[in-house]
Amino acid sequence: MKAIRLVGYTFGGLSAVYAGYYTVLYLTRWEWQRALISAALLLIVEVFLATVLLLTRFSRLEERLEQSDARIEDVRKRLEQTRAPAPNRFNWLSSVNRTELNGAQRTFVFVPVLMVAGAALSGLALVIQKVAGATARPGAERRLAGRLAALAAPPVAGSTARLEAQPAVPPARTGRKVIAVVTAVAALAMVPVLWTALADATQTRAEKAPASASTTMVFRVETRGDESAQAVQLAAQDLWETCRRSTAAENGNATLNHMRDGVYAGVVRPALPPHDVMRLRGCIEDASTNRTSAVVVGEGQAEYRG
């Protein structure tokens, strides 16, 4: 059981790290569709880990309840062993073995008028006593055992040593506490650093325009289903018109040229800053158009010629 939980925690932890890494990576590349998919996968893994943790806690709680019931039952059995046998409250009604008298004379005196009434009342009292003892004793003893279970010696699992040889207070695990504190401090210190890096990579900001005439983005477009030249052309045009508006810089002069089968070259004049080039490339490779995928095969900038 422990091995299964360890495998589940390991698999879930690695999957969460993997999904979180690619979520951040796609965000920095401005590939929003892929980032959403990775973030959804990260949420699924987190729910899986939370479910495994809750099931583990419930299993431990059930084990504790079973151990508590077992200890109560053990205490109740001990109470039964230490209980004195119930005395016979109606000795005069019990049968007598004549051989046990050893010649002694025993006189049985009954009042003739009260004989029948006394026997009836005694029998009724005996029935009431038996019913009361059969119904009240187990519940009372179980409640008493439940109260005394807290005073019983706890079982020592996985150890053959006597209870007296066990330490009253477990040894302090200083090394684990130090490692936990250092890990928590390091994680808290990394949060603002990662947050600043992610915000810097994904924010929209004005940049200085480069000293180039234009920026060229060469990409290949593929469609699923309808693979005709007209369908590919429409998909490429739709993708280019969508992605060229994702840049912060003005790009009113942006043309799309068909080079060969499925390969197109988008030209933006004037040239885009590096951050906008990254945003344009990420948008093209993200390919949010239905049943369309695109891959950037090259990019460059044309220098001014004096």
Image: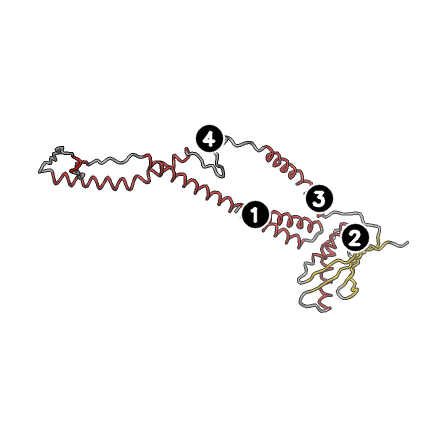
- Residue 282 in percent (x, y) is at 72, 54
Residue under label 2, please give it. Answer: 272
Q: Answer few, some or many: residues within 10 Å of disc 1's Cα (few below 14, many 20 plus, some between 14 and 19).
A: some
Q: Is residue 209 left or right of residue 282?
A: right
Q: Residue furthest right?
A: 306
Which residue corresponds to the image point at 64% horizontal and 35% vertical from the top-left?
A: 182
Task: Please say if 260 is above or below 275.
Answer: below
Whole-number angstrom distance, CA of label 4 to CA of label 2: 79 Å
- Residue 78 in percent (x, y) is at 36, 36
The quarter of the rendered structure image containing the C terminus is bottom right
- Residue 134 in percent (x, y) is at 28, 41
Q: Which amino acid, by three-letter code, is at mark 3?
A: Ala
The secondary element bearing badge 1 is classed as: helix
**Foreground of the two, 170 or 297:** 170
Q: Is residue 261 left or right of residue 89?
A: right
Q: How many marks?
A: 4
The secondary element bearing badge 2 is classed as: loop
Whole-number angstrom distance, CA of label 1 to CA of label 4: 40 Å
Q: Which amino acid, by three-letter code, is at mark 1?
A: Leu
**Disc 3 to disc 1: CB gap under 8 Å:** no
Which residue corresponds to the image point at 16% horizontal and 34% vertical from the top-left?
A: 102
